[in-house]
Image (tube, rainbow, N blue to C red):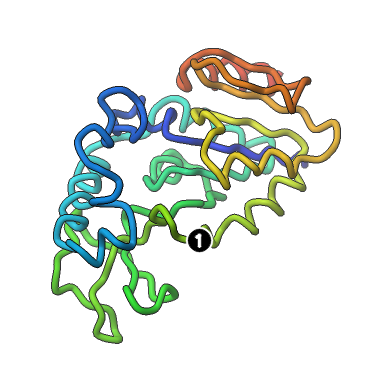
Amino acid sequence: MKRIVVLSGAGISAESGLKTFRDSGGLWEEYSIYEVATPEAWVKNPALVQEFYNARRKQLLESKPNEAHYSLAELQSKYRVDIITQNIDDLHERAGSTQVLHLHGELLKSRSSIDENLVYDIEGWELKMGDLCEKGSQLRPHVVWFGEMVPMILPAQEIVSEADVVLVVGTSLNIYPAAGLLHYTGRGVPLYVVDPSEMELGHFPSAVHIKDVATNGVKKLISEILE
């Protein structure tokens, strides 16, 4: 069975109504990354960090997967599909995808602030100051902040190296280390990119760029693959 590997980014979730961080009107216009998405921010004002992610979590629980998420899940009927996502939402899983690797963590989970191996599901949308892990430390969002290591990057590299086809959906390929994953594709492996923006794909001359939003572009692409 052919193995299709999908690299997904904020663009696919944006069509479900989730705000992206970098686009015009995005989250970084409301918050500084240094206030809510760094280890230093957590030390300085953990309550603000919790408030920020609680709002993101509440919005996520009110959102639904879109056609792009469902189309990727449908591929599983004929192919082995691994999704490597930069997104911290669970929309791929809710659409039915079963093999999803989250590079930057998961919004609906918390973890110990002293032991990163202690990870817990969050019931509902709120993680409060005073919610503690079994070792007695404050629980923090289970996300990778700027300046932190990306522990899932090595497993992601291995998955990409074994792909027969690679699809890139809704990501500018400007964010590292995620953008570097494409360099692990095997020689001659087809690469398809679905994104409405202009992209520099000079390192991948055979790449096919479908310049469209995820819901339209993924549907077109998958209908071709299934045929």
Q: Amino acid at mark 1?
A: Met
User: Mark 1 falls on what kind of element?
Assistant: loop
Name the residue rendered at 47%, 27% in the picture. 68
Residue furthest to the bottom? 135
Q: Is residue 8 left or right of residue 31?
A: right
Location of the C terminus by quadrant is top right
The answer to whether residue 121 is above or below residue 37 is: below
Q: In the rendered view, does 94 fall on the left or right side of 64?
A: right
Measured as percent of width and height from the top left, residue 12 is found at: 44, 29
Badge 1 is on which residue? 149
**Nearer to the camera, 67 or 177:** 177
Q: Where 172 falls versus 178 (above or below)?
A: above
Q: Position of residue 110 (x, y in %)?
A: 31, 65
Estimate how packed mark 1 is, as few (under 14), some (14 to 19) or many (20 or more) residues with alpha carbons within 10 Å: few
Q: Provide residue 127's location: percent of width, then percent of height.
A: 19, 62
Tally of numbered discs:
1
Residue placed at 65% from the left, 43% from the top?
181
Q: Is residue 169 left or right of residue 104?
A: right
Depth check: 36 or 215 in front?
A: 36
Assign the N terminus to one quadrant of the image.
Answer: top right
Q: Is residue 186 left or right of residue 165?
A: right
Outermost residue to the right: 187
At 24% from the left and 67% from the top, the residue drawn is 43
Q: Quadrant of residue 147?
A: bottom left
Instruction: Estimate the x, y position of residue 92 in percent, counting from the top left.
Output: 45, 41
Is 125 located above or below residue 201 in the figure? Answer: below
